[in-house]
Amino acid sequence: MDQPSAERTAYRICPLCEACCGLDVQVAGDRVLAIRGRETDVFSAGYLCPKAVALKDLHEDPDRLRQPLVKRDGRFVEVGWDEAFAEIESRLVPLIAAHGRDAVAVTVGNPSAHKMGLLPYFGRLAKALGTKNIYSASTLDQMPKQLSSGLMFGHWLSIPVPDIERCDFLLILGANPAVSNGSLWTVPDYRGKAKALRERGGRIVVIDPRRTETARAADAHHFIRPGGDVFLLAAMVRTLFEEGLVQLGRIEPHLAGVDAVRDAVAPFTLDAAAVRCGIPAETIRALARELAAAPRACVYGRIGTCTQPFGTLASWLIDVLNALTGHLDEPGGAMFPRAAAFAANTAGRPGSGRGIVTGRHASRVSGAPEVFGELPMGVLAEEIETPGPGQVRALISVASNPVLSAPNGPRLARALDALDFMVSLDIYLNETTRHADVVLPGVSPLEDSHYDVAFPQLSFRNHARYSAPVFEPSPQQPPEWQNLLRLAAIAQGHGAGADVLALDDQWLADEVRKSAGDHAPQVIAALAPRRGPERLLDLALRSGPYGDGFGMRHDGLTLDAVVAAPDGIDLGALQPRIPELLRTPSGHVELAPELLLGDLARAAAALADVPRDDTLLIVGRRDVRSNNSWMHNLPVLAKGPARCTLKIHPEDAARLGLADGALATIEAGGRSVQAPAQLDADMMPGVVCLPHGWGHDLPGAQLAVAAERPGANLNALLDEDSRDPLSGNAVLSGVAVAVRAAA
Ligand SMILES: Nc1nc2c(c(=O)[nH]1)N[C@H]1C(S)=C(S)[C@@H](COP(=O)(O)OP(=O)(O)OC[C@H]3O[C@@H](n4cnc5c(=O)[nH]c(N)nc54)[C@H](O)[C@@H]3O)O[C@H]1N2
Ligand SMILES: Nc1nc2c(c(=O)[nH]1)N[C@H]1C(S)=C(S)[C@@H](COP(=O)(O)OP(=O)(O)OC[C@H]3O[C@@H](n4cnc5c(=O)[nH]c(N)nc54)[C@H](O)[C@@H]3O)O[C@H]1N2
Ligand code: SF4
Ligand SMILES: [Mo]
């Protein structure tokens, strides 16, 4: 045992954003002394951002919940764990019996992607509930990219990422990795890698309605009218064909649909696209030529290209450009990671598969198609409000704050109040969880072990890294995977008193029997005595592409081996994976899926809809000291200048009579919010910019620090019915607003 106050340094992989930085957490006893980037980490090499330092504040935050809460007579009271689960059982079971399984909806939010106790076990809960009403942050974020990748390559997570260390031309659309630290692209220290790219003679070009931090550290930046990407990209594709610049390279035999793409982009002339997206025809042509001419190049797009009416088309055309210029699956281009664990594109027979489908069911009220097993977050409120068979009457929210994160949060908040029952798994009493009847707190991030389930599938380099809890988890507080299993047990009728560890054993045994058949007993024995997420991880690593195959390869990976590597294990630079990675039924890269060609006609029809000059369009913004909706209660991040400001071009501000710092009223959809104006010549004229995740002035939340500077909720303005029809993703960008000086 350590001395109570002995100093030690613990390794913690940061769970806050997709960069997955390795940290050194220096502690004495139960106190955190300092948090630094771990220089020897094989993947992140010492990089960290200011949010990592705030893990100390998060661990110590007096507002962070440590005890379950039950609402009695409109007030929350702290209760014991058994009492909380008994309450859930007594209310949920009769509700399901009376109204059916679809009466219970679940929402799952961003932090679950960063917790190995949440991601797999949430799936377990959803299955146990058997509800069609599954909602997640994915339809506020990346569903378009998952859909386009699924259609092209056969799996939802087969998403190519820039091989930045070997790339010499990087075209970035709608992403600001210098601040966001990358997304659907795990790339700690993007800035350092971008600098190195440029120092070896490469070029970075950024397309964004704001001259962002990423754009300022690039070689060129072009303003784009929000929502204009599909027109720009289609015109680039058309230029490649017209000028004979298509070069398919090594993967040519594996591509299907090249001719269909050529025919489909015919309407997107340079001139028409230029008017629509606001980028001159000559610039579009030059971009196409530069991309084609660069020996090692990549087009990368992120949230700005997803959260718009043509999100799936834009996401698709980005990879069409990569493929047609010979940069897909090539070193220095857009490459597919090969994750050590949990990747569907490393499992099963290589080279072809079942592919993906959408629309296996539809939402009850609007008929929105299911995508990746989910319904669009935008339809949740109407599913709660609209009476009839299948109406949502209960909600389980898991690490999600849709009252701030989803469009038209005010309507959703009213809908949540109308529920018969709501449970939240969360660490705060916040804008969403205040509506719950029972809140089950998660553990401190420093009391949690960590392996990234999802992000090695999106990493700039292959790696396997594990970190143990920094502090012994408190014995009173169950880990979240056990809470999810206990909810699953209740949903399946086993009762709140069910033995969750036995259920975990049972589930594991079922999984292993499916994959290992007759060898299942030996595999299960080899995984003992681990349980829970660690056992799933060991199974995934050992049966994964680098694994020991349970004795088949003596030097293969096991969890023991990863645990024993205090800086993680580097698994090398990305390698070409086509055709092995493909899981499409045809065994080809589908460049021209029917669904997308059909939707391209919608974009062609919209070519003529040039927005009026006097319309102001609003876009979002991320800040390095903020993380979506939930880190505004941490003093180390909350201090400093106000961050929830409305950036506006000085010419627009002058026209509206707005001075720098003056309070602006922003209106859309009959709703309005107020934020201080910040004059900024880095804004595209006609575009204003407000960050999301603010608006901490709602009654009933327990966020003392955040409430001091609540900020304005961008999503209060946005329309929940505005979606990309294919993916169900919300339109969060490029929405028309009216701005005036506040009275
Ligand atoms: N207008 C606009 N809206 C947006 C976006 C945008 O760009 N513009 N971005 C969208 C995107 S990309 C995303 S991902 C979503 C994010 O939206 P959400 O998925 O709702 O995620 P967060 O806002 O991060 O809220 C996370 C919740 O998880 C809780 N939490 C944190 N850690 C834990 C934990 O360890 N356990 C549990 N149980 N709970 C925890 C927090 O208290 C908080 O309630 O927002 C979307 N909303
Ligand atoms: N510090 C910090 N880091 C984060 C987060 C955070 O909240 N704070 N959130 C995390 C999450 S959940 C995610 S999903 C990622 C997102 O990661 P990124 O996608 O890199 O995030 P953003 O900074 O929102 O960048 C989106 C950019 O798109 C631009 N844009 C808006 N509309 C359009 C358009 O129509 N076309 C084009 N071309 N550009 C457009 C915006 O101006 C903005 O610069 O960041 C993650 N990292
Ligand atoms: S960049 Fe992301 S992963 Fe790295 S320290 Fe910051 S929040 Fe954590
Ligand atoms: Mo996100």
Image (cartoon, rainbow, N blue to C red):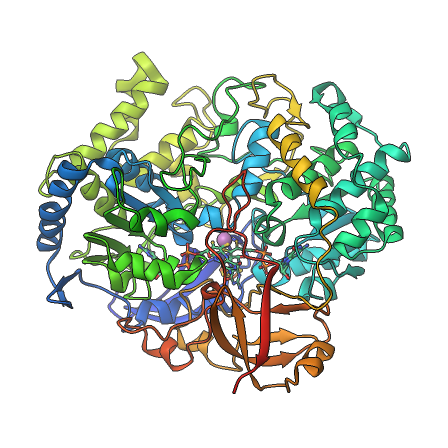
**Residue 114 image position (x, y, % from top left):** 42, 50
Between residues 386 and 67, which one lies in front from this camera angle? 386
Q: Quadrant of the N terminus?
A: bottom left
Q: Is 214 on the left or on the right of 571, as rendered?
A: right
Between residues 508 and 492, which one lies in front from this camera angle? 492
Instruction: Identify the residue at the far top of this view.
Output: 518
What residue appears at the point 19 percent right and 33 percent down from the top-left corner? 503
Q: Quadrant of residue 615?
A: bottom right
Q: Is 693 on the left or on the right of 169, as rendered?
A: left
- In the depicted structure, whether residue 167 falls above or below residue 101: below
Q: Is 269 on the left or on the right of 358, as rendered?
A: right
Q: Quadrant of residue 253?
A: top right
What residue appears at the point 12 percent right and 48 percent down from the top-left corner? 91
What residue appears at the point 55 percent right and 76 percent down from the top-left corner? 645
Q: Quadrant of residue 605?
A: top right
What residue appears at the point 68 percent right and 59 percent down from the top-left corner? 192
Q: Is 124 on the left or on the right of 142, as rendered?
A: left
Q: Is residue 617 visible?
A: yes
**Residue 738 image position (x, y, % from top left):** 59, 71
**Residue 730 image position (x, y, % from top left):** 51, 50
Between residues 228 and 579, which one lies in front from this camera angle? 228
Q: How many marks?
A: 0
Q: Is residue 166 visible?
A: no
Between residues 132 and 414, which one lies in front from this camera angle? 414
**Residue 439 image position (x, y, % from top left):** 22, 58
